[in-house]
Amino acid sequence: MVLVEPKMGDSRPQGISLQHDESKPDYANEAVFRRNALAPRSYYIPDTALLLNGRWRFHYAPTPLQAPDPSSPLDSSWTSIAVPGHWQLQGHGRPHYTNVQYPFPVCPPHVPTENPTGTYRRTFHVPASWEHDSHLRLRFDGVDSAYHVWVNGTLVGYAQGSRNPHEFDVTSLVSWNGPNEVFVRVYQWSDGSYIEDQDQWWLSGIFRDVYLIALPSEIRIEDWFLQTDLDHNYEHAILKASLLVVTSENALVSMSILELPEKGQGLGDNTIAPVSSQRVDPVSSSRIVHLDLPITNPKKWTAETPYLYNVVLSITTGEKEHSVHQKIGFRKVEIKKGLICVNGQPVRFRGVNRHDHHPRYGRAVPEEFIRKDLVMMKQHNINALRCSHYPSHPKLLDIADELGLWVIDETDLECHGFYDAVARPQDIPEEMDYEERKKLTFPIAAKYTSDNPTWKAAYLDRIEQMIQRDKNHASVIIWSLGNEAFYGQNHQAMYEYAKRVDPGRLVHYEGDRHAQSADMYSFMYTHVHELIKLATDEGVRPDGTFDKPIILCEYAHAMGNGPGWLEDYEQAFRTYPRLQGGFIWEWANHGLWKEEGDGKEYYAYGGDFGDVPNDGAFVMDGLLHSNHTPTPGLVELKKVIQPVRLAVEGTTLVVTNMYNFTGLNHLAGSWKVEEFSERTRLVAAGTFEPPEAAPGSTAMVPLPQAEWGAWCKPGAEVYLTVSFHLKATTAWAEAGHEVAWFQHQLRKAEPQARSQRLVEGLTPSIHMSSSRGELIISRNGQTFAFDQARGVLTRWSANGTTLLEPDPVTGAAILPSFWRPPTDNDRPISLPYWRRFGVDALTTQLRSIAVSQPKPDVVHVVITTFHTPPVLDWGFVATTTYLVSPVHGTLTVAVKLRPGGSYPPSHVPRAGLNLRLSKALNNVDWFGLGPGESYPDKRSAQRVGVYRNFSVADLHTHYDVPQEGGNRMATRWVSIRDPSAAGTGLRVTPAPAERWSSNCDREFSFWVGRYRDETVEKARHPCDLAGKEDAATLLRLDGKVAGVGTAACGPGVREDLLVKVEEMEFGFCLEAVGV
């Protein structure tokens, strides 16, 4: 246990020079990162603290030399600014987004001459209630990227390390009688910027809290480190404390531990162990005091059982006393049998990566916003978070301790941009195998800073700052050496520091491919089959044993419509215990709210502020929208990682407890049996107590035997739905919150021939006429029109009401189609591939048309068309059979597809029909998966049911970047009607089974909306869709749709979930309703 002891003589600075080295400024000197700053310590803000947030005076200059100094008058060049905040979000400069590449030339430690400089100043008064002999310090919790600070005209110090706190002793500089001025000069760019390249907006300024803190000058506890150790049975504990004290006379240092009040507020008053104490002699004793306190069987802290105690640390001379308090949890972290264990049990990370980001304030995130994030994580079954890629706002860890989350706390360190500096001149293609690219570039890139001894001290400073600030948090079980900073000698030095200072935690670093100085192997975006190979091969001895586990620090890139693959990863984690889970990239989109003069408002991404170079929408890759509401991806994740797995075997419900530490007695079970047809009918329902099931074990629950046979008799579809929800309210959810659910089909629907409607007094004779290439088929107010020149159905009307109408571009009301708007995950690989084959530009050639009337009430129109792009030699031969029955108001469309030509693509986005309906048809009901969107690799969170009274707009899936969305799978029927009339519209069911090939899904997919494919693809933001609605209701009916994958950064769509270019057959029955 190591605390940082201040050097003697550093406690009362009198002022420093502007530059440590006369030949170069502090902000361009890698050897200078803290000047006159106090030693880092545990985060603790006492009651005697003055928060200096609020409005500050502000001056913006293009370079440091043009910035004012403390003697400069407050003239018209000064304005005001909010602290915490970023100046780019308050009218000065512009936000700039890059993912990997640096936005400035690569020549460390030098920075651009144009180095925007923000100067802040404000006055304050020392509270009269404070003791006048107090030790005073000025604290900055976060300033981007480097700064000098003056108090009352005296230069106090310098610091950099944007997401790390710094404190300065200002005792001798502050006046107790009058106003005091703090003056801060902040530099946008510093040598530290090279190692803060963290896939986020470049934003500058004082963005976290600023405090004036008063502490007792003669006797105080300066810092403390509390560690808990458990015996070999993980039952009894020893609380070990190291305290750094200041005292001018003999004193007693003591430690007590108390139960927290039930509501978690206050210090608590029920001690659970005797007080531990030690006398300190200021002359002969060390300033560091060690105390041990044995505890009999304390309640243990885990992410599932976040039980906290309050520790009170005191130092007293009898007349003078200083006390601090710290919440702690008893837990032990270690590697056992090659696995990460807490309290002796292996853990599974169901985690996310989280940046500090607010859509209006950037990294100046309010505490209540952070709490909302973490509460939402818990509500969605997330149990871990990685602070990406820097220490988060200090209050986040208090909340994680309270709610229960495993935390990887990460050093403020990333220098990924050196990769581009090395790779681009070599013209290394991005499609080259990643491991091969690493071999060519990483060792060279590491030489800039990570494997450069002149940067060693800067690297060590960053891990020291993190560990010393956050060392007392139970939730932090792993320290990380940073992110995407290659690997070098400086990482080895950081690892050695972490292990020397805090051997009770593990160390992570993904850049250390072979875990030379890390306690686990860590990978990013690894394909599932490669991950399984790593689990069985990497570091595995011939006898199958291994020393280190594997985690995915980033996986399932959640950009736009995604991520796919979640079920596959989860299956791998369950099958191979060495794979201890991972952290989704990432928690939330980083859009910044932007309002333009023309009334256009949206969440902006790279390039929207004129920032060049930029990485566009790659900053919009989260499970939350920019406003921090869930995307469909988060809803999917909650279901996939739910901590209770359920199945039905015979007449038994099989319940598997996926928790690591708790049983299921905090949950209540409920079940219902529903019959689905045209409507939902509740057949039976009930509640039950979850079975006794230890963590990781399986238990059986018998289902009602008497009713089982009746439920399974032939008839309409019947489903059993089982739900587990919280019995009692917790800190993160109300009682009744659903934790896990499951559906099981008890009975399939009996095939039933649909009865044709009889029309009294009319014969079934059909009128057919042909004129100028148009074939008209009509009877009983039903009219169908075909364009015989182009081989397409152009319209269908019923009693004067338009059901289908011609598309203004193709002229068709129904047309085979293989295209949809691209997703973010399509763009890197699939989209250019599809475009290379012209899948987005198919034209239609008529090959043949035949009309016959095999029965008095049915006309067959068989049309053969070739769907092919210009320039190329491939296409689909489509034989489309229309069974037209105006007497009964039905139309069956059956399609046979056969690839033609010499050079077809291997896959397309979808295979189905595009239909153009009257815009009046706006009310949607369906029986299938819902209520949200579903795709072959993103459907677990949707339930089978009958869904009614949705508008077309309701079924549009919002994404911050418009793209494909809103598909719904496993559909038995869908009805689209005019809500303002007598329910006039169309009802769609799948054609008989003989019309479907085995490679298509007869439980079909549908999409309904108002935006054309090209409109969605051209839109950069949702506001670009405003006023672009089509004058019709657009419907897609698909025999097969492709999965979404994660190819924006990771594996693409699984091979078997692609829509292959091959022979296929599908069909649909359309029926006019309400006419």
Image (tube, helix red, strand yellow):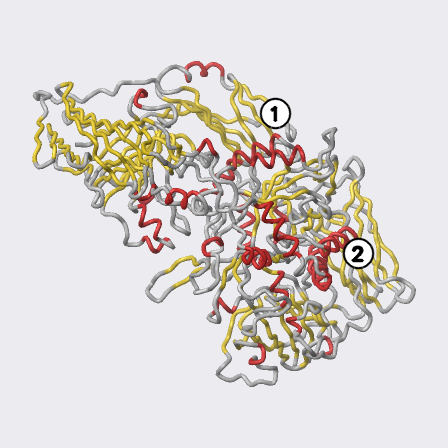
The residue drawn where x is 56% and y is 51% is: 354
Residue tagged 2? 2
Name the mark nearer the viewer: 1 or 2. 2
Give the image location of residue 35, x and y in percent. 71, 71
Q: Nearer the viewer, residue 462 or 334?
A: 462
Q: Which residue is mark 1?
A: 698
Residue 586 has which mark?
Answer: none
Is residue 120 left or right of 628 when viewed as pictured? right
Amino acid type at circle 1 is: Thr
Which residue shows up at 23% across the image and 44% down it?
Answer: 1032
Q: Estimate how packed mark 1 is, as few (under 14), some (14 to 19) or many (20 or more) residues with alpha carbons within 10 Å.
A: some
Give percent across and percent down for residue 333: 73, 43
Look at the numbered discs 1 and 2 and tell me whether their residues touch, using CB distance below 8 Å: no
Q: Which secondary structure, mark 1? A: strand
Question: Type of residue at label 2?
Answer: Val
Does residue 582 appear to the left or right of 815 in the view shown? right
Instruction: Estimate how packed mark 2 is, as few (under 14), some (14 to 19) or many (20 or more) residues with alpha carbons within 10 Å.
Output: some
Residue lying at 30% horizontally and 23% vertically, measured from the top left: 995
